[in-house]
């Protein structure tokens, strides 16, 4: 899904980059002082000077991701978000330059933006998918000098080992990257005739049951409920309590809990449950010739 910058946007980007390149670089001690003033005292002027000095770093990293078809200005702005996140978390006492620390946050922010917007269909859902999305093209080019269109099983294993991911993940992302988005309203054939054109959405199966199947299922469900209610009438009060608590509820009661409630041992509860199930089966057999086929007994 390509996004083109307008001429006005391109001019604005050039002005922004030109301005960013005029901001002087920071020496290590001044950078440390700015970071300490921001962290200890919330000095927004120090934060502004610190982040402005590294806007050129954002531009440099954003340039590496221009071939994903997203607006360059958006990549830069997402990188600036990562720069601000880095400034909020930076700990100057660790002795690491801010540029080193901020690079990870800037790159992560840009990559997350690309994954969210590269396609209307979500692409990367795991860390493995993200790694493959940004490295698969490069590794593809290494395989047989990029002469093969389709990856073999050995190719997928090679890439999986290089990136520390599963071969199945390689196959999933490779198929996703090699196949562009397609509108469901696009026609299947290349025919120019407007008559009898079939759209891709016409070929999608509906997984919902048919109307007659819904009617039959509702009728059968009501009939099964009547059969079960009639069979439950054959149980005495204690058997009915145990069956309801053990078989007819989502949160099944334990034998020990029912034993305490009824004043009997848990082994006695198990025995009564077993006898009650036999009585239910007998009662259902009197009403239904084959209760298992009717979905009543497993």
Image (cartoon, rainbow, N blue to C red):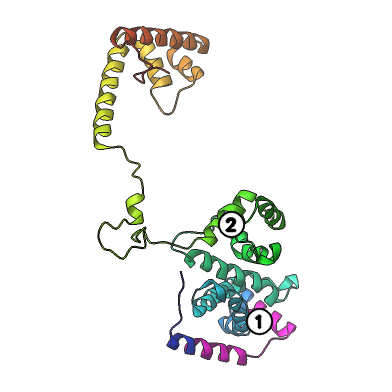
Q: Quadrant of residue 194?
A: bottom left
Q: Which residue is drawn at 66% across and 50% down?
A: 153
**Label for residue 129?**
2
Was residue 26 drawn as part of the magenta stretch in this picture? Answer: yes
Judge from the rendering whether residue 179 lies leftward or rightward of residue 213; answer left or right. right
Spatial separation of the CA atoms under disc 2 and disc 1: 38 Å
Q: Which of 125 and 157 is in front in this view?
A: 157
- Within 10 Å of disc 1 (Cα), the crowding (few <14, some 14-19, many 20+) is many
Q: In which quarter of the image is the C terminus?
A: top left
**Front residue of 154 and 176:** 154
Relative side of 119 to 202, left or right: right
Q: Main secondary structure of the magenta part?
A: helix
Q: In this view, does 137 lie above or below 253?
A: below
In the rendered structure, which segment of residues is drawn in magenta? 12-37
Which residue matches tag 1?
34
Q: In this view, does 174 lie above or below 40?
A: above
Q: Local crowd at mark 2 within 10 Å, few (<14), some, or many (≥20)?
A: many
Q: Earlier in the sequence, mark 2 or mark 1?
A: 1
- Rendered position, 72 above or below 222: below
* Residue at position x 69%, y 62% in the image: 143
């Amino acid at each position: 899904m390509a996004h083109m910058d307008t001429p006005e946007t391109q001019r604005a980007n050039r002005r922004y980059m030109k301005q960013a390149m005029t901001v002087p670089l920071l020496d290590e001690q001044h950078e440390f002082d700015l970071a300490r003033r921001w962290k200890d005292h919330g000095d927004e002027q120090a934060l502004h000077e610190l982040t402005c000095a590294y806007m050129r770093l954002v531009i440099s990293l954003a340039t590496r991701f221009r071939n994903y078809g997203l607006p360059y200005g958006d990549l830069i702005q997402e990188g600036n978000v990562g720069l601000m996140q880095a400034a909020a978390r930076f700990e100057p006492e660790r002795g690491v330059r801010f540029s080193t620390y901020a690079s990870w946050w800037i790159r992560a922010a840009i990559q997350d933006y690309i994954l969210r917007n590269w396609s209307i269909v979500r692409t990367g859902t795991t860390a493995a998918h993200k790694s493959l999305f940004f490295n698969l093209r490069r590794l593809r080019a290494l395989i047989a000098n990029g002469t093969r269109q389709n990856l073999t099983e050995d190719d997928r294993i090679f890439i999986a080992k290089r990136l520390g991911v599963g071969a199945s993940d390689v196959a999933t992302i490779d198929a996703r990257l090699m196949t562009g988005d397609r509108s469901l309203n696009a026609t299947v054939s290349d025919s120019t005739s407007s008559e009898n054109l079939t759209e891709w959405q016409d070929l999608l199966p509906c997984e919902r049951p048919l109307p007659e199947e819904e009617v039959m299922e509702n009728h059968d469900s009501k009939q099964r409920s009547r059969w079960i209610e009639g069979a439950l009438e054959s149980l005495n009060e204690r058997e009915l309590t145990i069956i309801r608590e053990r078989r007819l509820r989502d949160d099944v009661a334990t034998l020990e809990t029912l034993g305490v409630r009824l004043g009997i041992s848990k082994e006695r509860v198990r025995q009564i449950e077993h006898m009650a199930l036999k009585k239910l089966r007998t009662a259902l057999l009197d009403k239904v010739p084959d209760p298992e086929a009717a979905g009543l007994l497993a």
